[in-house]
Structure formats: C-alpha cells, structure tokens
Amino acid sequence: MSRKQQLLRRHRRNKRVGLLLALVVLVVLGVTVAWWLPLVLAVLGWIAHEAWFADHLFYSPREDYQYSFPPFTQQPKVHLNAGRLRLDEGVILDEGATLILALRIKSTWLGRFIDPLVELSGGERDLQTFERGVDGLRYLNLSEQGPALSRGELRLRGRHCRLLGEPTLWSFTPPPVQQRVMVIAPHADDAELAAYGLYSQADEAWIVTLTAGEIEAGHYQKMGLDSVEAARLKGRLRAWDSIAVPRWAGVPEAHCVQLGYFCLQLAAMQAAPSQPQGSREAGLSDTRLFRQLNPFALPGDADGAPTWNNLLADLRELLLKARPEVIVLPHPTLDPHPDHLCAHHAVLQALEGLAWQPTTLLGYANHLHDNDRWPMGNAGDGVALPPVFDPDRLMQPLSLPLPLAVQRDKAMALGMMHDLQPPAPLKRRLRRLIQYVLTRRVRSVYGENDFFRKTVRRHELLWLLTPVKHR
C-alpha cells in the first residue's frame, strides 16, 4: 500500500469516528433540548465542513517543512527589515537562478479561516499561498524577483499571516533545458500539466505518453454506452489528445508518441515483466487500438502485448531515435500515483546500458502524498515549494517562469484535453460555492477542473534528479 493510500485510509477512519460522535451529540440534543435543533446544527456543520475542513491535508499546518539542499549550494546573505528584503552589500545574484527563501510564517486568527498568503511587490508582483493555520518554516519562490532583490526594492507582506525570524536564501544555477527535451507522460495531459512551458520553448521536443488512460469512463456511459464501449472511446480520445494537443505548442506530429498501455496496470506489468496485463475496463489485451496514430512503428507493435518488456523495448527505441539531452519524468518520491512511479522506473531501466544517455533528468509532481490542494492559491500566482518532511532527501528545485501569454496557451492546451472537460460533480460545485462565499476562494477563469487552478501559474516547478553521465 502506498503512503498516500495509508494517509487516505487514516483520514477516512478518523472522519467516520468524528461523524459517529457528532451523530450521538445531535441525537442527545434532539431528545433533551428541541427536536429541530439537530437539523439546524447538522446543516450548519455540513457548511462548516465544506468551507474549512474539506481539504485533504494529511499533516499539521504547524509542522516545519524540512528541506535539505545539495552541499555547496550558494546562500546569498539577506535580511528582512520592515517588510523589505535586502542582500548584503556586494552580493551579486546569478542571472536566471532559481531563488528559494526560507522563513517562518505564522497565520493570524483570520488566517485559520481564509488562506494566508505572502505578497511580493517592488518587482514582479506575486502572491504565494500557504495552509490555513500555518505556523512553521516555509519556502517562497523568488525566482523572478532577482532584479528587484538586487536593487533592494523587493517587499514581502503577509496577508492573514506574519513573517517571522531571519530568512535564508538559496540560489540554484539552472542547467540548460532549452535543448532536445523528451517529456514522459504516464497519461495524456501529464506533459501539459507539468511542463508545457518547458517543452513549448525547447529547441526540440518529444512527448511520449505511456498509457491510454481509458478507465473511469462514467462520463461517456451517460451517452448510452456500456462500460466497455465507454472505456474504449475514452482511451481513443485521450490517445488522440496525446498526439494532437502538443501541436498547439509547435511540437511536430512525428515527435508525439502514444504507447497505448493500460491505465493503472503498469505496476502489475513491472511485477511480472513478460506477462500481459489487459485493461481493467476496456476488455482489451492488445495495445494497438490506441497506437494507430503513431508516426512510426515500435517494437511493441509486433504483438501488441501489454507487457513490461514491450514497454522497455518501446522506450529504448524512442530514446535512441530522439537522443534527448533533457528527460522530464515523474518525481520518484513527491508524486505518489502508481502509474507515475512506474513510469519513472521504466525510464531509468530503459536507460541502463543504452548507447545514448541524457545530460539532465528533471522530475515533476502532478499529485502529492499529503496535500491535494498544492499548489495552493489561484491561477496565475507563483508556486511555493511543496510540503516535504524528509531532511535526509536532497532536493534541488528548478523554477521556470511562464509569461502571461504562455500561461494562456497552456490553459488552452489543457482545455483541449478531454479528461479535463467534464463538469464537476454537484457536491464539488456546492463546496466551491460555499468556499467562494465564506473563504474567498475563486475558481480559475480558464476552466472548472482544479488542474486549471493548480498548474496555470507564473512558474513551472521541476526538480533536478541524480545527474546522468553522458556517454
């Protein structure tokens, strides 16, 4: 069982216990006070839950984030006085560096009910949001603020929170990434969510999608299709998306590949590399239905068997053909989705002994273990570092700025993805309305799905993984 599954199980168990206790209290009040009182309290309790307690936050907001950065990372000296962040005299920042500022953030009483945030001004105006009730060490992303910081004009102001203690700044020199880039997407839309800005500005880009993403096709069953027909239609649509949508960013069709393996079956394939693992819902044991749009044949096309060995052969063929200098793939510890974890392992295994090796590996996290709302805040805001509580793990962030025009293009690319188009369930829409009224949360202007809020931002945050030596 993954860590996220364990956290979800514990959360649901605690929620059931809380509901049982609340039910007992309501029954007692109904018997001893007034019959109508439990009904009123139940409605008010549900509204309060949806407004302030519905986030999946599996840690205390009072915990410190615990990051460890690589040894010898530059630490320019800074001081925060009266809201102005200043460098020590004579300190010069590297151009284009990723700048991360650690400081303590403590919410005010109102910050327990409205999301606390830090406003950056004096340079590129930005807002970075944190957990309600935050009281601990957090990491701001100042990567666009270098010029203002160098001029001594950068200001930090807490809204519904206070900034405490002496801050610490880290400066990370970015590796060259505007080269030949290959983005590994476990599902259609993962490449766009994580790295649209990166691959749209690369010298050359390849998008390789591993699965058809055919499961959970209830939206298509409403059209009168049975479960198998709906899964096949959804898989065909997402296969199309994976080939067609990158064209919006200028990626040629010849560089977009859909491998057609089946959603949530990669772990079973990895466990038994030569044993085929058919689709859970589409009634298929042949990947070729979802590979028909590929621009060239791959080893897995010979028999269409959904096996780990075929996946590795496909990846090796693509790596040798594309010869990417930069590979972007799911982060092995931040992103807990089982298909994302297997995608990471598959790429590393495919690279073993290969004649071509990339110079840079970059990891991304489209999902988190313990905070389903991260990145917090609104579309267009900056991306602060996510929660990490393992100081033994070295992390090196890479923040890529996305101009407003690129943000809008990214939003349009996401809007073309069929899996992000269906309307949210009624319960989720009611929750958003309640949160809008009571907590000032607003949905993205770009789309209803929460990924429009999460990923159309001022930055794309990636992580430099263990460097791969060039041949």
Image (tube, grey):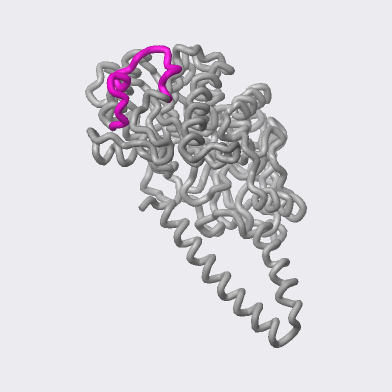
Tell me which corner region of the image, top left, top right, bottom left or bottom right, holds residue 445.
top right
Q: Position of residue 470 (x, y in %)?
A: 30, 19
Comparing 154 with 334, the one in front is 334
Q: Position of residue 200 (x, y in %)?
A: 55, 19
**Can residue 424 be seen here?**
yes
Query: Residue shown at 72%/66% (left/top)?
Result: 43
**Can residue 190 be seen here?**
no
Query: Residue shown at 62%/41% (left/top)?
Result: 450
Locate the C terminus by quadrant. top left
Q: Is residue 292 left or right of residue 14?
A: left
Query: Residue shown at 28%/34% (left/top)?
Result: 276
Vertical order, 246 against 365 (above or below): above
Q: Dominant secondary structure of the magenta stretch?
A: loop
- The boundaries of the magenta stretch are 290-307
Q: Position of residue 356 (x, y in %)?
A: 29, 17
Comparing 89 with 168, the one in front is 168
Query: Residue shown at 47%/32% (left/top)?
Result: 232
Vertical order, 365 against 39 (above or below): above
Q: How many discs mark residues in the rendered view? A: 0
Tell me which corner region of the image, top left, top right, bottom left or bottom right, holds residue 309.
top left
Q: Position of residue 267 (x, y in %)?
A: 33, 41
Q: Is residue 439 left or right of residue 258?
A: right
Comparing 358 with 64, the one in front is 358
Comparing 454 with 314, the one in front is 314
Q: Is residue 444 magenta?
A: no
Q: Is residue 291 magenta?
A: yes
